[in-house]
Image (cartoon, grey):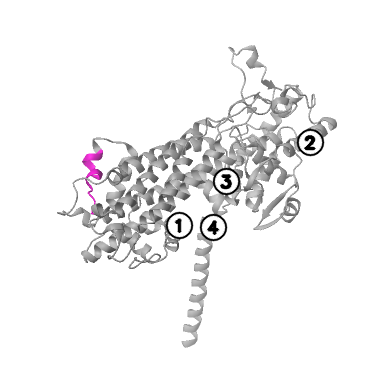
Amino acid sequence: MRYFILVMRKVFLITFTLCVTHLAYASNAIQTEPVILDGKNLTIEEVVKVARQNVFVKIDNGALVKVKRSHQLLLLAAEKDLPIYGLNRGVGLNKDKTIFKGNVLTAEARKESEQFNMNDIYATSAGVGPNASREVVRAAMVARLNTLLLGNAGVQPSVVEMFAAFLNNDITPIFPSGGSIGEADITILAHIGLAMTGKGDVWYKGKKMSATVALKKAGLKPLHLFAKDALSIFSSNAYTAGMATLAVYDVEKLINKYDLLVSLSLEGINGNVAPLLQPVRTIRPFPGQGVSADNIITYLQGSYLLDTSAKRALQDPLSFRTASQVSGATRDVLKDLKQDLTIQLNSSDDNPAVIIDISPNENASPQEKTYYVSDGKLSGAVIPTANFEPISWVLNIERLNIALGHMSASSTQRIVKLGSFCINQISRFLSPDQATIAFAAIQKPIMYLNTDIQQQSIPVSTISYPVAGEIEDTATNSLLVVQHLIKIVDNLYQIMGFELIHASQAINLKKLQTPGLKLGKSTKTLYSDFRKIVPFLQKDRELTPDIKNAYEFISSYDFDRKNANPPRSI
């Protein structure tokens, strides 16, 4: 009997271990489920997963068939001697130069085409500045891969397969982060073509090495570009769009944390919640404002601010009263931008565009008909476009930069008011006693940061100069616009760190006056977590470490996990 019990116990332990192992494997399999790319359904969240979490990508079979047929149509058009930009004709001002005539598959034409493609890659690899970050390069690659899968570029199938192989084998081309004027990121993205042909340097599984060595380690063969491959690799806005996608994801999280911080600051001054109440929002129903106001009221549930107070002002300074309007307006702009970027991530910005399975209608003009080809089995068109123009979403990024500038100005003024005795009802500069200077000089770096943000929010998309023999005479400066956005976000997080320092100090001082002071459930969590990192200022100390720690805390604060009441978003 005892032996039987021991045997059964052993069987149970083995079975339990196997079950746990199976569940862990299943859980991991769910977490590593690849992102399926078909050219039409890539989301902002999926770009973030691939760029930052190294999630694998998988090419949809139907999309790969479309890529193959698109390539065949392009070759058919070349065989019929249709003039095609970037294939049998030059690029830029050299659009009038003939590279070859007739069938690109003949030995001589193929050789000329391959040489032209490599020359094009070399001549267009012309970036400046520090190297692009790994996550931005990966975002650019997944963005371009997805748009190539629409079948409008005419690339060899091996090109899209190489994009997927680079992402899944952790091969990241190393190249400068600047140099695009915002009419396709050609001088930057060309470096990806270099790496795919075995040229230049890459990061391979975290180690820097030549592209040739990395390809060999990954079991890949360098690409031999021909036809329109080179142009298709670099003539897109994938670099700027990928960078913007990551920034937009970060901004949405910033706004949610901003509203939580506003809630804590309101508690720091015994603020009035009247402007946030539902009846007020109903009579002026801007969507973003409603979301922000609703979130702030939710964060304040359980707070002393929802009880009456004889010391409470009838109306607070505008930086407190209009906080939900300011962050709400940013939400509205962000919604528009997300819609535009989603279109960008799932549409073709190729020039020329290869479009399969279409034919001219009976009313088509003679000029229109010149772009169409057919051999009875395959038909379509190769049409010059201006789809590389990104102005629609660039303008919305500039709107977002301006909106974030307003959020910065509002936060800056709340900080000043939190340190003002006539507003905080505690002490000047939130000093705990007469001998402590506290937060007097600290206002200067806040103004420095806010001024920098205001400068970065000035529109630059209208500034352009003719290039490429003056044929390219307008531009959007999309890369500068997105780089401004990224800097604004970083600076705004620093300002939010300052606001958190001030609001928390005010809460501490109010608690000394009213030991039973009640905070909202969400604001209490924020305050308690922050105090583990930056303690109450009881006497003067060096503030630089506090400033750094506050910035790192608020910028990395896991809001969604910490907050019991998840924020609403538009």
- Does 114 sit above or below residue 163? above
User: How far from the left and from the top, in percent, is residue 297?
Assistant: 27, 49
Q: Earlier in the sequence, mark 3 or mark 2?
A: 2
- Residue under pointer 2: 114
Cβ atoms at labels 3 and 2 below 8 Å apart: no
Q: With 40 as the anchor, is 296 left or right in this view?
A: left
Select label 4 or label 3 by which is in front: 3
Q: Residue 234's quadrant in the figure? A: top right
Answer with mark 4 or mark 3, whichever residue precedes in sequence. Answer: 4
Magenta part of the protein: which range?
270-281
Res. 423 visible in picture:
yes
User: Position of 3 compared to 521: left or right?
Assistant: right
Q: Nearer the viewer, residue 473 or 302?
A: 473
Classify the position of the C terminus by image quarter.
top left
Q: Residue under label 1, please give it.
A: 556
Mark in the foreground, 2 or 1: 1
The dot on residue 29 is 4
SS of the residue under disc 1: helix
